[in-house]
Amino acid sequence: MPAAVIGLLSAFVYGSADFVGGVASRRLGPIRVTAIGAVAGLVLLLAAWPLVGGRISPAAIGWGAASGLVGTLAVSLLYACLAIGPMSILSPLTALVSALVPMAWGLLGGDRFAPIGYVALGLALVAVVLVGFVPEKGAVRPSVRALLMATAAGALIGVFLIMLDQTPDDSGVVPLIANRTANGAVMWSVVALLALRTRARSRSRSRTTPLSSRWTLVAAGGGLLDATANALILIGLRVGDLTTMSVLVALYPAGTILLAAVVLRERVAPVQWVGLVLAVAAAALLAVS
C-alpha cells in the first residue's frame, strides 16, 4: 500500500478519534477522556506487540516517550486555543503549521519528489487549510495569545511526527507503547490532582450511572482509534517519507467533519468539500509521483 494511501487513511482515523473523543468529552470532560483513551490505546498496542513484534531499545523507548510528552502538550495547547477562538482561523492555522514543520524537516533531510509531487504537496497544503476551516458566524479577529498558542500547538504536532520518524525501523510498536505510557502517566496524574482539589473544595461525589459507564466506553473507543491512527502513521513513515505523511496527516479534520455529517447530521461547508476533493487529488498525485 503506497505511503500516500496510508497517510490519507491515518488522517481519517485520526479525525474519527477526535470526533469520538469530542462527543465523549461533552459528558466526561476532555482531561478524563484523554486519560481513558491513553489506557485503552496502551492495552491495544500491548495486545498487538506479540503479533507485530518490535525490538526494545533506548532509541525506541526514548523517542516514543518523548513523542508522548510532546503530543500531550500539543493537545493541551490545541484545546486551550480553540476554547479562546475563533475556531475558523485557529483550527486551519494549527493544521497548516503541523504540516509545514515536519515537511520542512523532511525536505531539508533529503526527501525528494518528481515535479508532480511538489504540485501535489502544494495542493495538499491548500486542502489542509480548507478542510480545517470551521464556519463561524460573527467570528472575531483572534488575539495574539490565541495565534501564538495555535502556532505552538501545530509546531508541537509536527515535532511529534518528526520524533516518530526517528524511531528505529525494527522497533515495531514499542515506540507507541512508550508514547502511550508517557501520555497516560501525565493525564492520570492531572486527573488525580483535579480530583484531590475537588474533594478539598467540596464533599460532593460525582454520580456513577449506567450513562457515565457508557460514555467511558465511548472514550475508550476514541483511544483505540487514536492508537490505530498512530500505528498507521508509523507504518507510513517507515514505508514512505516524512514530508508526504506530514501533509496528509494534517488532513485529520476530514475524518471529524465527515463523521459529524453522518452521525450528527452537521452541515459540511462548501469550502470543506473543496478541501476534501483536493485532499484526495493530492494523495493520488503523491501516490504516483
Image (spheres, rainbow, N blue to C red):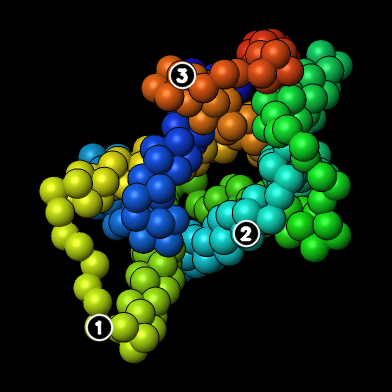
Query: Of helix, strand and loop, which one carries label 1?
Result: loop
Which is more N-terminal, label 1 or label 2? 2
Q: Which image quarter: residue 245?
A: top right
Gap in Å between the C-alphas at discs 3 and 1?
A: 40 Å
Graded by Cα atoms within 10 Å as few (under 14), some (14 to 19) or many (20 or more), the crowding at tag 2 reads some
Q: Which image quarter: residue 201?
A: bottom left
Q: What is the number of the mark on residue 203?
A: 1
* Front in this rendered view, residue 32 or 207: 207
Side of 114 relative to 155 (left or right)? right
Q: Please state, as top left, top right, bottom left or bottom right, where the C terminus lies in the image.
A: top right
Whole-percent x and y of residue 213? Answer: 18, 50
Q: Are marks 3 and 2 in contact (CB under 8 Å)?
A: no
Graded by Cα atoms within 10 Å as few (under 14), some (14 to 19) or many (20 or more), the crowding at tag 1 reads few
Q: What is the number of the mark on residue 265?
A: 3
Which is more N-terminal, label 1 or label 3? 1
Whole-percent x and y of residue 89? Answer: 77, 40
Query: Which residue is located at x 35 percent, y 80 percent?
Result: 198
Whole-percent x and y of residue 123? Answer: 79, 20
Graded by Cα atoms within 10 Å as few (under 14), some (14 to 19) or many (20 or more), the crowding at tag 3 reads few
Q: What is the number of the mark on residue 80?
A: 2
Q: Amino acid at mark 2?
A: Ala
